[in-house]
Image: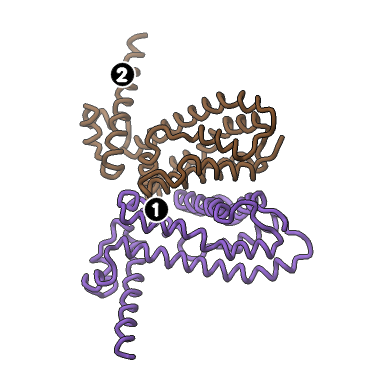
Chain colours: A brown, B purple
Amino acid sequence: MTESVAPSARRQATRDRLLEAATEVFVEEGLQGASVEAICSRAGFTRGAFYSNFDSKEELFLVLLEREFARQSAELQDTTDELAPILRGQSCAIGPEQAAEYIAQILAPKGDTTAWYVLETEFCLLAMRDREMSAGYAEFLSRSHAAIVGPVESALAAAGRRFTLPAEHALAILGGEYERAIKITALSGAAAPGGVDELARRISEVLFAITEPI
Amino acid sequence: MTESVAPSARRQATRDRLLEAATEVFVEEGLQGASVEAICSRAGFTRGAFYSNFDSKEELFLVLLEREFARQSAELQDTTDELAPILRGQSCAIGPEQAAEYIAQILAPKGDTTAWYVLETEFCLLAMRDREMSAGYAEFLSRSHAAIVGPVESALAAAGRRFTLPAEHALAILGGEYERAIKITALSGAAAPGGVDELARRISEVLFAITEPI
């Protein structure tokens, strides 16, 4: 048993260390500026270790993007699980202002969202010029909204509402609002005017337009 | 009179030729790949002529972006002006399916939308790392939705509907749908499945959710 498990665990540890080192180097140098050498040197590995785990730094980045998205989805699930009994306990129907307060709690920034957005934009640009990368990225984008339909619909149901549009379309609209806010923040170099509260108010506004009481 | 007008007209001609040459070079080489030398050489001018008109290729690009947006806004105005009497002439209220047909007419591709999207993404990435560029771009983005509120609200009014959200917010949502479709097209290297008709159907769907009969 030990014989066959050990190499796999060691391999996973190598992958994890490369992923962590790459995150640091990407944030510091950008996706284009980061070299495989710099990532290996930060992780304390050879180029051989890198290439036995990843085909390229772009493939590694897509793995990081998937991990970051999985982390955010799990967080969303936790937050909506906590909110659901509170929402169900409300004695009267929730209005847009109250919903905006809950949405602000869900959106409260965790980690460096702006740095991720800059890196993802860089990746998107590379992918638009590289057919091989774009296939994986397009597939990730189409999966990403589907993955958060569950927690969002549960929270809505707890608040006594449901989407009037197909859930995937509704999530794309809400995701678009979120992305636009991050873009403005990344461009202005500071939180957008009004910050999370303003974004939550806008999301609540459109949420009431595309949902109805159950 | 001739004395003072002639230099200005010549200056405008120089600017126009530089802008046209830059468009070609940007589409061929990308924003980062294009050099001021290549733009000057294509236009048949010296670097001196370039720098007496623009501070940098990035500043020139922002001028191109504004021109392209003004062209698209004028086209939108023309199309909605043509549609308005047809919409007003309808004997009964327009439904989502019929609206989608009109929206498909408005969205029918003109020019190389994908090439522009790739260039704008490249510009956005540069702007997120350069405070000077980002101010002008953020200002352009915030103006861009406001500029098309007029024609969109007129077309809606002709169809007997009005937004239930603030117009700027509603336009941001519709613009987000459009941008997402261009992004998927740019990534897939071909028109998205269903193309303009699918996009028009989605826009119509959300349009009915965020408008009401007058």
Q: Residue at x 38, y 66 (%)?
A: B64
Q: Residue at x 49, y 49 (%)?
A: B184
Q: Residue at x 53, y 40 (%)?
A: A200
Instruction: Give whichever of A214, A86 is nearer the camera.
Output: A86
Which residue position is annotated with label 1?
B121
Q: Give the letter of the chain under mark 2.
A: A
- Circle 1 crowding by C-alpha within 10 Å: few under 14, some 14–19, many from 20: some
Question: Which quadrant: the N terminus of chain A?
Answer: top left
Location of residue A56 in the rendering, given as x and y in whole percent from the top left corner: 31, 38
Whether discs 1 and 2 lie on one chain: the answer is: no
In the image, what residue type sits under mark 2? Arg
Instruction: Give whichever of B7, A188 is nearer the camera.
Output: A188
Picture layout, residue A7 above or below residue A26: above
Which residue position is annotated with label 2?
A10
Instruction: Give whichever of A173, B142 is nearer the camera.
Output: B142
Q: Residue at x 58, y 56 (%)?
A: B167
The answer to which image quadrant residue A169 occupies is: top right
Question: Which quadrant: the C terminus of chain A?
Answer: top right
Location of residue B150 in the rendering, given as x and y in whole percent from the top left corner: 58, 64
Instruction: Give whichever of B149, B56 is nearer the camera.
Output: B149
Mark 2 residue element: helix
Q: Give the letter of the chain under mark 1.
A: B
Location of residue A172 in the rendering, given as x and y in whole percent from the top left corner: 55, 43
In the image, what residue type sits under mark 1? Thr
Q: Are marks 1 and 2 in contact (CB under 8 Å)?
A: no
Q: Is residue A169 visible?
A: no
